[in-house]
Image (cartoon, helix red, strand yellow):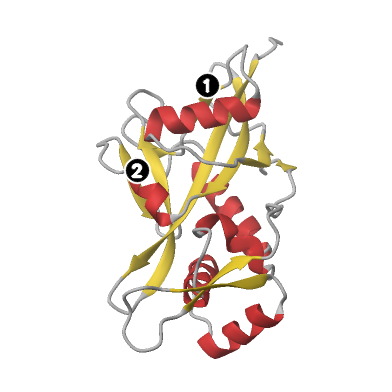
Amino acid sequence: MGTACTSIAVSTVIFTVRPTGPDGSHELWLPLVRRVREPYRQMWALPGGPLGQDQDLETAAASYLHLTTGLTAAHLEQIATFGGLTRSEGADERVVTVVYWAALPTHDAASGDGDLNVTWLPATDLPPLAFDHSLIVSHALARLRDRIADPTVARSFLPAAFTVAQLREVHEAILGHKVDPPNFRRHVLRSGRLEDTGQRVAGTPHRPPALYHFTTEDAPEFFRSRSTEETP
């Protein structure tokens, strides 16, 4: 019996929040890259590629993200390893993929637009993706939603100063449904995680909304790294 080679690859799931529709609802979107060679030629895939001999994992993930989409994430976090025995069927070697995630504020994510081989799509309404990338996206979404009870889970999606309404929009995008605005406001203001900056949104009619920031500068750990082995 021959011994199959094993290679390591990295993939990155990047989320941002975008408004969709006239009702003011918001959704999670993510960038995908069109494959230009086999296997899965012309299909959409997550940004990523094989790990170089002289690269560490996070450096490789950041490098492929910027190379394929033009995006730069301030913080990448490792969330899972996909190494099931059946995920590389038909390939010359077994591929183990280490998955990273990041969130980008909307204005930062806009820098990735304009490339014909890059598209942004709603994270919950994707076409079939190359390899097992649909499973990877579902896993990342589930991990994100698991931590939604922590108000600071939205930190990376927001500018340094934000309104309670903006924070609520991020939570609605992650959860996939509307939340009651008065109850949400009471909850987050009582949580002790927000601090009024003393500033207000300029150029708004009537009473301008207050701007807040999180009370700690420590980035929250949204996920705990763990391995994921797919079932055959």
The numbered dot on residue 111 is: 2
Picture quadrant of residue 197: bottom right
Marks 1, 2: nearer the viewer:
2
> From what the image shows, is residue 21 above or below residue 155?
below
* Quadrant of the rendered image containing residue 222: bottom right
Residue 54's spot in the image, x, y percent? 62, 12
Picture disc at residue 165: none
Tell me the crowding category of disc 2: few under 14, some 14 to 19, or many 20 or more residues within 10 angstroms, Cα based. Answer: few
Viewport quadrant of the N terminus: top right
Using a 10 Å C-alpha cutoff, classify the residue at mark 1 as few (fewer than 14 neighbours), some (14 to 19) or many (20 or more): few
Observer able to see residue 10: yes
Measured from the top left, where is residue 83 in percent x and y?
67, 33
Q: What percent of the width, then of the height, locates residue 31?
A: 40, 45
Marks 1/2: CA distance?
A: 34 Å
| Camera sees residue 127 | no
* Amino acid type indicated by mark 2: Ser
Identity of the residue drawn at 73% across and 44% down: 225
Amino acid type, residue under disc 1 in the picture: Ala
Q: Nearer the viewer, residue 207 or 37?
A: 207
Is residue 148 placed above or below 13 in the rendered structure? below
Q: Is residue 146 left or right of residue 176?
A: right
Look at the numbered disc 2 and give the secondary structure of its residue.
helix
Q: Is residue 81 above or below residue 89?
A: below
Q: Quadrant of the C terminus?
A: top right
Q: Residue at x 48, y 28 (%)?
A: 64
Q: Which of 203 and 42 is in front in this view?
A: 203
Q: Which of 199 and 191 is in front in this view?
A: 199
Position above or below: 21 against 96: below
Q: Which residue is depicted at the point 59% across and 18% down? A: 93
Is residue 128 rendered to the left or right of residue 172?
A: left
